[in-house]
Amino acid sequence: MAAKGSESNDVTAQKRMIQALTGETPEVLPAAPAYPGLFLADFERAFYIEQYRMRLHQAGCDRYAVDHDEDTRFRARALFNSYGIFKARPDWLQVYRGASRLWAERTEIVLHEGKLWYHDLQSGQQVTMDEAHLPRGDEVSRVNHAKTDIWDRSGEIGGAEDADQLIPIRSVADLLDSGEMDLPRRVVADYGDRTFITSILDTPFSYLYDYLGFYGLMTSLCGRPKLIHHMLQRQLAQTREVVASWAAVGIHGVYVEEVFTGADLISPRAYDEFVLSYNQPYFKHMRGLGLLPIHYVCGDVIPRLDQMARCDVAAIAVEESKKGFRIEIEDVVDRVGDRVAVLGNIDAVHFGLHATLDEMAAEVRRQARIGARAKGFVVSTGSPFPVDANPRLLDVMVETAHSMPG
């Protein structure tokens, strides 16, 4: 018989996470590092490419038309297998939407000079697969450049009509019919009985950054509040459809990220008016659809904790101390742990790059002892692990959590 904590992680991971997030007591503590997909992106892409390399070899050709259903299977398998680089799998798997049927219809995979390329049949554009994002939706395959911050796009929005053009309302039926939700549906079907499946979405306020940029968003709160409210109402309507489509494919929870709303950036009045008043119906909608929301907020979150806990969230997740503010897990647990579950905030940079295996284990045990006072606790990090972190440190984080009673 296996010793406690040594059982196969992907057999009981789903149950462990759900128990921790709903206030039940799991047999052992679950572990879910923040944004594992960022750490695993290169591995996921490599597994995906290799499946097409094998397909071209089997077909004996150097051009292969993408089939949507087959491509979806390739993506789901690559995502799950990327987590296999860990000796101890985390208790959740985070999935994004996949590519649409329209993308598949216009795309073929080409073998040229030993490399595989996406070839867009409409534009003629070719991009090497090992340099490209895994395409989502209808987007044309593009080189994986480093993401640049958006400073100010507010001048591009003259009023409500421009905002409506930027924020179209896509219905649940449209999202499902497009095929881009087939990837999470496949992941749930293949792996949802083993592990907790979640997506990553923004709050309505955080989505506005994409349209306005940081400076444009911050200055518009005071300079154009009516436009901001119009955009937030529009975004809330769209996110309701998006959330309903995720619920329809059967995922278990949503990791809801929020940026630029900490006490270090906006006032309590602005938070209540532009953030909290839209988060409350947003999370209520999620819960009504049977999803478990985990609300992750960047920045100085301590003064916001009470308002966050008053939203219908299953758990709260926070950053580690950095950038001039301090966030101790004790403070989070003491302030809201009696009302919601809490995710840990292990320092991902320090413990991912500079700690020993023993030091990682000690930090997990320290945070777990504090987290035992909360309604539920999940061992986690305050930020994503750096891509050059030692995977064995992540293994120790998960193994140590699984050695401790929930």
Image: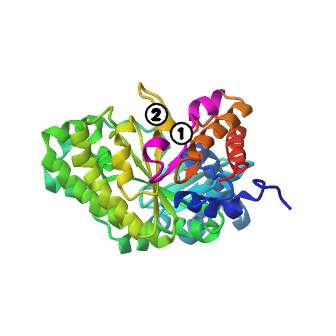
SS state under label 2: loop
Q: Quadrant of the N terminus?
A: bottom right
Residue under label 2:
327
Looking at the image, residue 300 sits to the left or right of residue 389; the answer is left
State the residue at coordinates (29%, 50%). Answer: 276
Residue 176, image quadrant: bottom left
Residue under label 1:
345
- Label whose residue precedes the other's in the sequence (1 or 2): 2
Q: Which class describes the residues within 10 Å of circle 2: few (<14), some (14-19), or many (20+)?
A: some
Which amino acid does the dot numbered 2 rest on? Ile
Say if 384 sits above or below 170 in the image. above
Is 37 magenta? The answer is no
Compare residues 154 and 134 and report the one nearer the observer: 154
Compare residues 383 and 344 and report the one nearer the observer: 344
Looking at the image, residue 155 sits to the left or right of residue 323; the answer is left
Residue 148, image quadrant: top left
Is residue 229 at all visible to an observer of this figure?
yes
SS state under label 1: loop
Compare residues 279 and 105 and report the one nearer the observer: 279
Q: Which residues are magenta?
A: 333-354
Q: Residue 129, percent across and down?
A: 57, 50
Say if 379 sits above or below 216 in the image. below
Asked if disc 1 and disc 2 are in contact, CB closer than 8 Å, the reply is: yes
Which amino acid does the dot numbered 1 rest on? Asn
For residue 197, which numbered disc appears in the image? none
Q: Residue 78, percent across and down?
A: 64, 57
State the residue at coordinates (19%, 48%). Answer: 228
